[in-house]
Amino acid sequence: MLEQIKGKLVVSCQALEDEPLHSPQIMAKMALAAMQGGAAGIRANSVVDITAIKQEVALPVLGIIKRHYAGSEVFITPTLKEVDELMRAEPEMIALDATDRARPDGETLAHLVAQIRRRYPQLLLMADTASIEQARHAEKLGFDCVGTTLYGYTPQTKGHSLPENDCRYLQEMLAAVRIPVIAEGNVDTPQTAARCLALGAHAVVVGGAITRPQQITRRFVDALSA
């Protein structure tokens, strides 16, 4: 999958239960529209959505399961249970929360990765991170690629955004690790996506700016109300 998406766009097709487009059939059609628009891959949440998407398009899928556990802020593929579930849908890659926050049942990221590698040795793993230190740690643990996904979405990075200061965070991550870096999180314009690739990102993941019409509409409404 990494070679297939190199220098290209991955579209995140996700809709949570409280969103109008929450439906595997709708996400499958969203993935089809993304493919017709030129996307090279899809990021998707849940076994049912990934299964439906794979029946609709031939693009590689980066799979996740968002699930909350008591006592932990980690919710992107937090445990081996989610990985086992995802493998029923056979995504080409799985992304995990690779932050340093407390994980469910006190498990360490290192232990989780070791378990996954033993059970699924050919599976590609992406680390969703929020700091340069987390990216370096993910590289040491053997992740195949690392993403800027959670920058701006943790208490320590709240208020920050990937595009700020000419994507400075992305530039710092590119200088800090040798594995491919995926630009993801608040990439909300084609210009920002192109800039991420120009800086050296392996690929760019765009979600809400393409697939969440309520967010797109709100941007227009806010601009008209300014």
Image: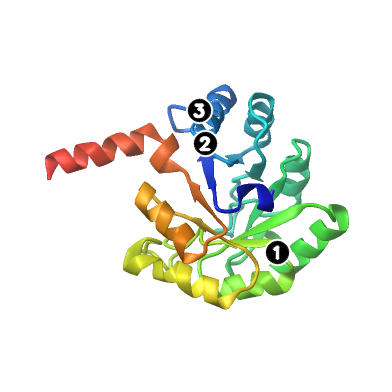
Residue 128, given in percent of the width and then of the height, sits at 58, 59
Marks 1/2: CA–CA distance: 27 Å
The reply to whether dot 1 and dot 2 touch (C-beta < 8 Å) is no
Tell me the element at label 1: loop
Position of residue 101 relative to residue 14, above or below, is: below
> Residue 132 or 2: which is nearer the viewer?
2
Instruction: Name which quarter of the figure residue 41 lies in.
Output: top right
The residue under label 2 is 38
Residue 163, given in percent of the width and then of the height, sits at 37, 61
The residue under label 1 is 143
- Three-letter amino acid code of the residue under disc 1: Phe
Residue 188, given in percent of the width and then of the height, sits at 37, 48
Residue 122, given in percent of the width and then of the height, sits at 83, 53
Position of residue 59 relative to residue 195, above or below, is: above
Mark positioned earlier in the residue sequence (1 or 2): 2
User: How dense is the environment of label 2, judged by Cα within 10 Å: few (below 14), some, or many (20 and up)?
Assistant: few
The residue under label 3 is 33
Q: Which mark is residue 89?
A: none
Front: mark 2 or 3: 2
Mark positioned earlier in the residue sequence (3 or 1): 3
Mark positioned earlier in the residue sequence (2 or 3): 3
Front: mark 1 or 2: 2
Q: Residue at x 65, y 74 (%)?
A: 137
- Three-letter amino acid code of the residue under disc 3: Ala
The reply to whether dot 2 and dot 3 touch (C-beta < 8 Å) is no
Q: Quadrant of the C terminus?
A: top left
Q: Is residue 169 left or right of residue 224?
A: right
Q: Residue at x 69, y 25 (%)?
A: 55
- Three-letter amino acid code of the residue under disc 2: Gly
